[in-house]
Amino acid sequence: MWTAEDDAEERASKVSTDPDVLAAAVTRFTLNTPGERHPAALYVDGVRQRLPHISDDRRVLANGLKGQLGR
């Protein structure tokens, strides 16, 4: 957990290049509000993606690419 979003994004960028890691995300949580969170960034191979998340239905991937995970 980081208190500065820039530090969290720097770490996510580095982690996203590790072997067997598909992506690394940064999520902002709100204190004293259980369950409240907001996607801040998503990194794939060290590159910040345009969309900050993969959609819940798993048909829309980072940067709007359509497909399925695992292919």
Image: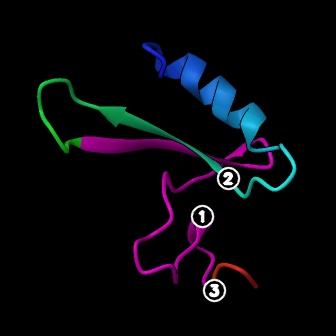
Report which residue position mark 2 lands on: 23
Whether residues under marks 1 and 2 lie with C-beta atoms below 8 angstroms apart, the answer is yes
Q: Say above or below: 7 vs 23.
A: above
Which of the two labelled residues, at mark 2 and mark 3, occupies the earlier sequence position? 2
Report which residue position mark 3 lands on: 67
Report which residue position mark 1 lands on: 62
Give percent across and percent down for residue 69.
65, 78
> SS at mark 2?
loop
Magenta part of the chain: 37-66
Looking at the image, residue 55 sits to the left or right of residue 60; the answer is: left
Question: Is 47 part of what is drawn in magenta?
Answer: yes
Q: Say above or below: 28 vs 50.
A: above
> SS at mark 1?
helix
Circle 2 or circle 3, nearest the eye = 2
Circle 1 or circle 2, nearest the eye = 2
* Type of the residue with mark 2: Ala
Give me the C-alpha separation between circle 1 and circle 2.
10 Å
